[in-house]
Image (tube, rainbow, N blue to C red):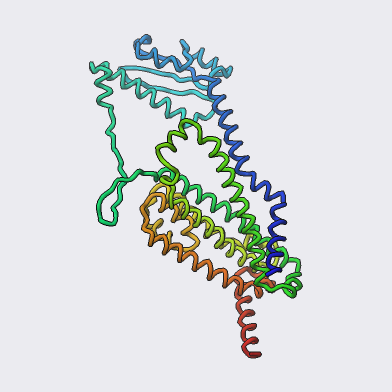
Amino acid sequence: MNKYWIITKDVYLKNIKSVSFLIMLLAPFLALGAFYVIGQFSSSDSEDLQTGIVIQAETATLPELAAFKKEFTSYDSRESGEKSLKSEEIDGLLLLTIEDNTVAAELLSEDSTSQEKLMGLNFQLSQLQTTLRSQALGLSLEEVAAINTPVNIEVQKISFNEAGNLQEETDFSGIRTLVGMMSTILLFIFIMTYASIIAQEIASEKGTRIMEVILSSVSSRSHFYGKLSGILLVALTQVAVYVVSFGIGFYWIKDRPSVAAFLAEFSLKDIFGEFLLFTLIYLMLGIFIYAVLAALCGSLVSKVEDVSKAILPVTYLSLAGYMIGLTLGLSNPGHAAIRITSYIPFISSYTMPIRLANDNVPLIQIILSLTILVVTLLALVMFSSKMYRSNVLIYNDNGIWAALKQSIVLMKNERQKINRSG
């Protein structure tokens, strides 16, 4: 056990002190800062320049155009507008033609126009055309507003208690879905990052051909668990830093009027409750089971250069869960694929949090899913630790499947020798 802790500490400290870990730790904060700066520059750029407008109408002095023209830089002719566009005084020129109460528009711009701006222009022009046609039909603004009043659909989340009685609930599926999606993205990022790290950690010693010397002084099981635990502690350290950062950020914004008003009406326990607990459990178990699989794959390669090929099973499994959780989770969280895969190990860590965010999943189903995941994890850990000793002594350049077959043969031969000697 002492040797196990020595290996765990050595692996943990070596990775925690590396520059790559510091970059990986700071990457989300740097990305958020970059998005904030880009957003500030984008908003400042959009405020500096206006879109020019040239109106060609049967009656250019229509009172309906007065309010519309205030949001643009108005020009008397197309030539003067194009001149300002050429000198970059405006970011675009809108040519507006109105005939028989029908609005036609053409937007001239040197740069690609954002969809947000096009949607805004389309809405404004549609409102203008509605006003012109309603006046031509003799309708007042109040009558037009009454016609265009949308139907309000009130959605009420309900559930049935043990007595079978209907009871109303507050719908928190929106914010829970956001948390579920964040869990899916974080799980994928952690797996892609630490699968490579743990596979390289094992393959590096194997590639130097000193594994035989190491295993002569420490058991293969202690070495395997020590390496695995060290990397998992690094991952937990990163998670802990993010949790603390989130707590500090929440402490700073909790007294803001909008946040305080929201928390006064709803508590975090009401919003998340058991959902957040189960989501974190699935997140940690997902990291753990993929880390064990990556360690198994890493022990099968002979050179560090082959690690990227060895962890392809990890990559494909993780990518499948990520795509199912992200695509179907956004479009149709109640899809049969989400429900079925929430019981499949490796995939359930991605899809069950999506189900929990949108459905009232019975506790028995959650326990069943977790039981299958934990049993699979324990079985994989036991299988990997047994295979580890023979895996690290195999040097096969024909791929991980050939190395795995050779390792299984070697393990069977060792068992037969032990049985004969016994």
Residue occupying image coordinates x 65% and y 57%: 197
Residue 320 seen by the camera: no
For residue 347, side relative to residue 335 (left or right): right
- Residues 146 and 100: in front is 146
For residue 6, side relative to residue 122 (left or right): right
- Residue 99, located in which quarter of the rendered image? top left
Q: Quadrant of the C terminus?
A: bottom right
Residue occupying image coordinates x 56% and y 39%: 249
Q: Position of residue 198 (x, y in %)?
A: 64, 60
Residue occupying image coordinates x 51% and y 12%: 80
Q: Quadrant of the N terminus?
A: bottom right
Query: Can you say whether 330 is above or below 52 in the image?
Result: below
Residue 85 seen by the camera: yes
- Residues 75 and 388: in front is 388
- Residue 342, located in which quarter of the rendered image? bottom left
Q: Position of residue 184 (x, y in %)?
A: 50, 51
Q: Position of residue 414 (x, y in %)?
A: 64, 83
Q: Position of residue 294 (x, y in %)?
A: 60, 63
Furthest residue toward top: 61
For residue 64, side relative to residue 215 (left or right): left
Q: Give the tally of numbered discs.
A: 0
- Residue 68, located in which quarter of the rendered image? top left
- Residues 173 and 104: in front is 173
